[in-house]
Image (tube, rainbow, N blue to C red):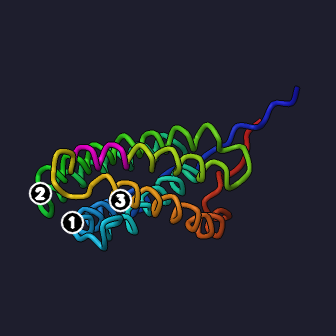
Amino acid sequence: MSVRPVPVFAPMTLRALLLAVLAMGAVVLGSNVLVQYPINDWLTWGAFSYPVAFLVSNLINRRFGPGPARRVAWAGFALAVVLSFWVATPRIAVASCSAFIVAQLLDITVFDRLRRGSWWRAPMVATTCSATVDTAIFWSIAFAGSSLPWMSWALGDLAVKLAIGVCLLAPFRALLWKMAPVKSAG
């Protein structure tokens, strides 16, 4: 039985950490504003921006490893809490922050477990799992019991997140050479 080499990750610089946290904060801020604007009975504008958070998480995880990816998720969570209560209703803010941290930590764990497979497998499976959990948590906390068509919005949101997740495989692959682990250790 052959043993696969263990990846050695690049150290995360302060600059990379700040850029990743700002990217997460911008995605959450934008999504929390955009989710308040329905396109129709199946979709809000927030569905189009939020999947970028999974791309950021997966790229950080690929280059720097799961530990730094978790630090980015927690720092992004802290920033999201502040920004969400500033730009959204309290219910949307609580729903967003709850869904964000659970989904991000799930995404990081699934990605890390699958990282040694085909280049597309880890980001696709991690994004699919975390987008599904994120959707269930967010929509049930944010809108359950309201007269809004939140169930159909949740289904539309999930469909768009999954479709965008597939589309984001292209930039993930394009950036893979730059974001791959430094080298393998025996």
Amino acid type, label 1? Gln
Q: Earlier in the sequence, mark 3 or mark 1?
A: 3
Discs 1, 2 touching: Cβ within 8 Å: yes
Residue linked to disc 2: 89
Return the x and y of residue 177 as percentages of the image width and height: 68, 64
Q: Residue furthest bottom?
A: 39
Amino acid type, label 2? Thr
Q: Earlier in the sequence, mark 2 or mark 3?
A: 3
Which quadrant of the rendered structure holds the N terminus?
Answer: top right
Q: Which residues are magenta?
A: 135-142
Residue linked to disc 1: 36
Q: Main secondary structure of the magenta part?
A: helix
Above or below: residue 21 compared with residue 138: below
Residue at image coords 19%, 53%: 92
Q: Earlier in the sequence, mark 1 or mark 2?
A: 1
> Is residue 137 a member of the stretch shown in magenta?
yes
Residue at image coords 15%, 60%: 88
Q: For the residue carrying disc 2, how many other residues have a C-alpha within 10 Å: few (<14), some (14-19), or many (20+)?
A: some
Residue at image coords 43%, 56%: 158
Residue linked to disc 3: 24
